Image (tube, rainbow, N blue to C red):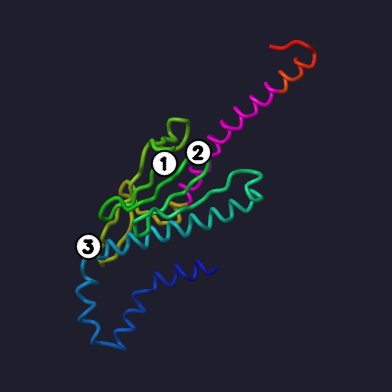
């Protein structure tokens, strides 16, 4: 509920600014130049979009992790800020990360990586290859909206899709790790049993 109120407050920011200018009309001269600068508007929208994305990812991770029982049932999803950036962040689990970053003016990029090399979920069945880009567009009434392949998208939609893909990809990776560990454990048990019977291999 608090997050919904926060998003509502963000969407109503223009109204609060308008009311403040009624109280302090002399401030309009100072604010008018910046408020009409499309470059500045896109920069501010980018920070807000990244902030909204992170908030949705954090809400999703909190709910998802609540089923892990402190990591005993499955590895939890962690979210970290990216150093020396205004709002970039990454999501991490099982040696795979999803990096969400402002890669250029009006561009938000989302890309998977495993260790230090690019990771492509599409190569392992399902998902998508490489990094994807969302682009900011300036509308006819100076509103900023975000697009993917020319289609308008919302932060919640993007976060829901990528969080789902991230969990699938990291689950598959973990299954592979568990399978190897399980096979080694079974092999060790067989060796111990054969050793007891004097049939070492």
For the image shown, how many numbered marks are present on the structure?
3
Q: Secondary structure at mark 3?
A: helix
Q: Which quadrant would the N terminus be assigned to in this image?
A: bottom right
Q: Which residues are magenta?
A: 160-188
As for residue 173 lying within the magenta part, the answer is yes
Q: What residue is at 24 percent from the left and 77 percent from the top?
A: 31
Q: Residues within 10 Å of mark 2 (few under 14, many from 20)?
A: many
Q: Which one is closest to the eye, mark 3 or mark 1?
A: 1
User: Residue under circle 3?
Assistant: 39
Q: CA distance from mark 3 to mark 2?
A: 36 Å
Which callout, 3 or 2, points at the residue further toward the start of the chain? 3
Res. 169 mark: 2
Q: Secondary structure at mark 1?
A: strand
Residue 162: x and y in percent read 46, 47
Res. 52 mark: none
Q: Is residue 185 left or right of residue 156?
A: right
Residue 120: x and y in percent read 41, 35
Which callout, 3 or 1, points at the residue further toward the start of the chain? 3
Res. 112 mark: 1
Work out whether 153 lies above or below 48.
Answer: above
Q: What residue is at 45 percent from the left and 37 percent from the top?
A: 127
Quadrant in which residue 84 is drawn = bottom left
Say whether marks 2 and 1 touch (CB < 8 Å): yes
């Amino acid at each position: 509920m608090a997050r919904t109120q926060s998003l509502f407050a963000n969407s109503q920011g223009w109204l609060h600014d308008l009311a403040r200018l009624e109280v302090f009309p002399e401030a309009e001269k100072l604010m008018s130049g910046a408020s009409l600068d499309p470059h500045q508007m896109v920069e501010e929208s980018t920070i807000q979009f990244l902030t909204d994305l992170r908030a949705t990812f954090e809400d999703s991770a909190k709910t998802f992790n609540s089923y892990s029982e402190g990591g005993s049932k499955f590895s939890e999803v962690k979210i970290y800020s990216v150093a020396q950036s205004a709002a970039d962040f990454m999501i991490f689990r099982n040696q795979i990360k999803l990096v969400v970053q402002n890669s250029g003016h009006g561009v938000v990029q989302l890309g998977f990586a495993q260790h230090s090399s690019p990771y492509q979920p599409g190569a392992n069945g399902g998902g998508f290859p490489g990094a994807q880009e969302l682009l900011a567009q300036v509308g006819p009434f100076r509103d900023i909206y975000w697009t993917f392949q020319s289609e308008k998208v919302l932060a919640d939609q993007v976060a829901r899709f990528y969080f789902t893909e991230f969990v699938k990809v990291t689950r598959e990776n973990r299954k592979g790790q568990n399978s190897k560990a399980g096979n080694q454990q079974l092999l060790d048990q067989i060796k111990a049993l054969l050793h007891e019977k004097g049939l070492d291999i």
